[in-house]
Amino acid sequence: MDKNIKKVLLLGSGALKIGEAGEFDYSGSQALKAMKEEGIETVLINPNIATVQTSEGVADKIYFLPVTPYFVEEVIKKEKPQGILLAFGGQTALNCGVELYKTGVLEKYNLKVLGTPVQSIMDTEDRELFVRKLDQIDVKTIKSHAVETIENAKIAAKDLGYPVILRAAYALGGLGSGFCDNEDELDILAGKAFSYSTQVLVEKSLKGWKEIEYEVVRDCYDNCITVCNMENFDPLGIHTGESIVVAPSQTLTNSEYHMLRELSIKIVRHIGIVGECNVQYAFDPYSEDYRVIEVNARLSRSSALASKATGYPLAFVAAKLGLGYGLFELKNSVTKTTPAFFEPALDYIVCKIPRWDLSKFQGVSREIGSSMKSVGEVMAIGRSFEEAIQKGLRMIGQGAHGFVANREIIVEDIDKSLREPTDNRIFVISKAFQKGYTVDQIHELTKIDRWFLDKLQNIVLTSKKLSALEEIEELSDQLLLKAKKEGFSDFQIARLIFKDRTDPDITASLIRTIRKERGIKPVVKQIDTLAAEYPAQTNYLYLTYNGTANDVKYLGDHKSIIVLGSGAYRIGSSVEFDWCSVNALQTIRNTGWRGVMINYNPETVSTDYDMCDRLYFDELTYERVMDIYELENPHGMIVSVGGQIPNNLALKLDKSGVNLLGTSAKSIDNAEDRHKFSSMLDRLGVDQPRWKELTTLHEVNEFVDIVGFPVLVRPSYVLSGAAMNVCSNNSELEQFLKLAANVSKKHPVVVSEFIQNAKEIELDAVAKNGEIIAYAVSEHIEFAGVHSGDATIQFPPQKLYVETSRRIKKIARRIAEELNITGPFNIQFLAKENDIKVIECNLRASRSFPFVSKVLKINFIELAAKVMTGTEVTPPSNSAFDLDYVGIKASQFSFSRLQKADPVLGVDMASTGEVGCIGDDTNEAILTAMLSVGYRIPKKNILISSGSAKQKADLLMASKLLSQKGYNLYATGGSHKYLIDNNIPATLVHWPSEPDMQPQAMQMLKEKQLDFVINIPKNLTQIELENGYKIRRAAVDFNVPLITNARLASAFIIAFCSMNIEDIQIKSWDEYKTY
Amino acid sequence: MHPNKPATLHLENGAEFKGHSFGYDQAIDGEVVFSTAMVGYPESLTDPSYSGQILCVTYPLVGNYGVPEDSVEGNLSKLFESEKIHVRGLVISDYSFKYSHWNAKKSLDEWLKEHKIPGIYGVDTRELTKILREKGSMLGKIVPQGANLEIMEDPNLVNQVDVVSCKEVIRYGNEGKKIVLVDCGVKHNIIRCLLRRGVQIIRVPWDYDFSKLEYDGLFISNGPGNPDFCDITVENIKKALSEDRPIFGICMGNQLLSKAGGAQTFKLKYGHRSHNQPVRMVNTTRCFITSQNHGYAVDNNTLGSDWEPLFINMNDSTNEGIKHKSKPFFSCQFHPEASSGPTDTEFLFDDFIKLL
């Protein structure tokens, strides 16, 4: 080990985005833990305030600053570290590191790159260098032609023959890449690809080949191991982040498995990786022919998955190897006695399934392909493929109960949907089987290996046997056990047997009772890395029906507490709840209890078996949670730190006798049930926007006559598109209700008055027996109408009337008392003047808990967990809520990956991640936050097209500032007139609908003549305005910063006009003092 | 096929595992052992080292890629490790009735039937493995419903090496240096590895006195069971030790060479039965992942003064190979020929060839 390294800098990955999500919080946290163990001081740069790695005690110094060369150099100047870790913060950190190397910054500050040398990274990132490198050792790659112009791309494609794939060099997980079947398609795609990179690769498509990955570790002594291999269920052509993946590979023979393993090691040695990397192969399904797709010279999503799939802590080991350790000097952290130089043997199968949220986006293409669109993933563990995949399909949390027995989906053209996969593909396969398609037919259309399809067919066959039963008495033990071994839930079995005759929730309980009477129960197995060859003390567990004995003994001493985690990351629920879960576990363990975690998200820190006394990597369904509760027999369970999934289970668990810690299930229901909550507010004399649940169009019209437009409409059953919509007039309302929502007695809609130009305010708090002991009030920059998950949030509030603030606290106190809250909760308010209305109340931790906890430096979850477990707490003193600085939480959007999606903000959440930055004033905090989510301070040219008169007026002051600062303003028709009328010079730019007029907005975007686009949609409806949509989409596709909200645009403009990037202070979190 | 016909695995300690019968429908007994390898059932099943044994595969999904059609030309199997299945029975958790692979010609079930080998699926193989690892080895029997098998015979009372070794001298190749290969149950990939390096092989039965043969190097193969049955082989090796011609041994070959050099073997608390065994070359920083299948090990402390350990197991520090301090004699406990398993140590064949 290198003894000269006393202090290291670790680059994080910033806000969660599609392609770069929670996995890097996990890998970064592991690396920091490894450094800590060596007594090395750690400095972390990561603006993602909701992560575990940016928590107290994980790194010694934390900077909530953008991970860009400028800020990293500033931190290096100040902190003077000896080493830097580039491999733990995804592509963001890697790209930044390469840039710092190329510009000589690393050399200038004599900074040693720990782990894989930068030259090796560049050899893997630059396709041409990569191919050349592997040619040296006769390893086959996908031959590609690197081109710098669209014309040359066409020539290359002609040469290779269509179909071809285009890739932008140095792009995040497939950004700007895709397949082209002909020259026309190539023309369009190449244009986009060149906006991300000056170099584009044209390759021959190998559609239909298997996709196989190996996770390889190498130390500086040239010792190599492959920790895990994985096989994609979907063949090549679908990005590995979009594919269902199993580990280990299932259809490879010994010679294939070891041929690819040997190749991986050869490649990794030749490239000179030190640490961890991932090798991806395309593998011919009809021979042993292969191509190397790519090598990721860093920790990746796959490596996080491999760590969880095997129990081998790849990031932790990679960090140690970066310090110069040999694999033989490190221990296997599961067995604690054997060395880290070994390859895990699995005795189970894991199945990773992506989670998409495409229905949140208007107009988005639902096809999945070579670029990533999924926002999260789950990992299911079983001892049969059927068991694992059915578990997994429940875990993704989109209403599926498994592979079968789901709500019928409508597929217009099954053949087409099989051939051109969408996010629904697995359910289309299910549908095809139901319709009598054979395995061969489905294979022909999908190219999915028959082995997987045969297994899926087994599930269908068993479901048919179950539906053939007329009554429960006919269900044999044998069939019941078979179904459970194939991963059927009690609910699925109930629905198949009882059809739709009775409520499946009730019949599912009946199945559960019968099943237990017949002794058909799951068993608990350990993940021990050695397939039971040696005894291992491990707390990493899963449940299966493919077994007869438990691996663990239960003490039954009621000294454990179960914490329910947050499940798959999705829009609206991600790393923040992982932070909450981890902090709850830590507090539980610090107060003398054993902490037990249930969660199934491989991207999280909470599913690291080091974080708790027992980890059940399993489902968060009522059935499975009860299975575990009955085995574990704990003191109680916490359902309020994992977001909505555990919260939704509260009532049912409570009815089954589970001891829920904290606020009672009845209170949770009183807050969740719209009617109960509303009458409670009435009783307390607290105002709320008027709303009504309605079942006919006539009733809706009557209600609208009273409250007036606009109204917010929430259907209980959604036919297509978004679940919520704001309607501004009669035609919009009718169109939405007719096309999108089916209004009926069975499917009522909730219509509420929509208050415009109101402030939205949030209160995050912890209460004990109905009394608030800590609270944080924060304020949205945007007016109400932007989902609170997308809004830019300011804490503490800077522009709130004292009166408003006082009233909010008063209302919160009343609600806390009425619901007798013990634990975390969040209330959202609307404020117009001093008129305050409550929008909703969640009796659980909210998305903003880590943000306010870290800005305030009071850990709300620690307080909440103590309160819930009955530990004494001292409420923070009042002065603790007085701050000399400001925190801004800004949202990260991933529209660039969501082809065709309209990048506007509305009542449904669209952001995939967030950052939280701190500054001495709002301007500093907002500028830092906006730079952290990828905005750039514009150089010269700005396009404004600002919607309605009100929005134009909102932007006037900011426009003036821009003009004074010397920016060139360009504006479309109405906005141009408005600017000129107000004596602000501006150049008229024409709409896309006037293609012959010059200058043309689209042309300017394409030619990168614009540095910043402000485009405000005229109203809040989702009905796209063709022109505005085209400009917004072009801005996203050509990577030009875009803001679509007037108040946010103003705040950003004011910030960058009042200060420069150099004015942002390089201050670590601990330098912001509280009293 | 009777996909639902119940079957039971009985162990000598009275434990029972219920499952379903597949493969050949007949009761069978043997020593129950396990392997944690995740791939390579055709290779394992034909490995002569499993002679007399019922194999439990800990990886739960088996049969996925079927079984290819093998051909045997000139006493050498093209794809497998011998001409036939050597395990007596197979115990697994989840059998894939349907297989999928371009080179598969039949299912595992069909192949087992062809070779009259019974199997049982649906067994909690992890629980079984936990029992087996604690006892080291245990007798057991697979009994399909309706079949009967009262007694359990200990296959270790029989010299399994004699069962699987060739009965007469077989020659391979006609050019290059001559290697005498003492067949204690040789895996065919060892022969393939040597032939690929351009040598001639004279494969002799385990008890054959090869000292009269004209050869350039001696190879002692892997094999099943207890090394104590092979005293004749040890005596023959001792003669070779007095000369200077290179010697290389694998697995059983490591144990026999050690014994010839004066060392003793002992039974391991936890046997090595996997593809993921880490070994380290003594006095170096070089480590390798190896394929292993043995329950006995050479006692490092009993190595004669002319000998030293060559490899050490990184999990339990047991011996994984020895070498002579001055003469070109060495051996390894693991399987550098892999098949099945990782190929990291195939270079040992090169090392041997270079010595000739």
Image: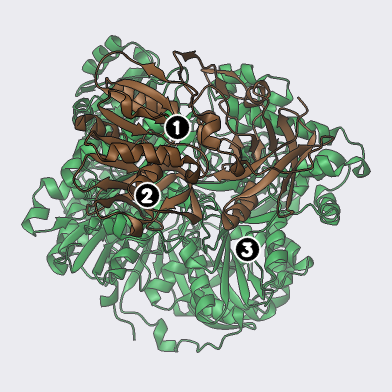
Residue A720 visible? The answer is: yes
Q: Colour of chain A?
A: green
Query: Could you tell me residue A586's position as x and y percent?
Result: 49, 73
- Amino acid residing under circle 2: Pro
Secondary element type, mark 3 = loop
Q: Are marks 3 and 1 in contact (CB under 8 Å)?
A: no
Nearer the camera: disc 1 or disc 2: 1
Q: Is tag 1's residue or tag 2's residue first in the polypeptide sequence? A: 1
**Residue at image point 30% right, 47% down:** B322
Q: Horizontally, is A84 left or right of A234 in the view?
A: left
**Residue at image point 56% right, 31% down:** B163
Q: Horizontally, is A492 left or right of B94 in the view?
A: right
Secondary element type, mark 1 = loop
- Amino acid residing under circle 3: Val
Q: Residue beneath label 3, please?
A: A552
Residue B136 drawn above or below residue A424: below
Q: Residues within 10 Å of mark 3 (few under 14, many from 20)?
A: some
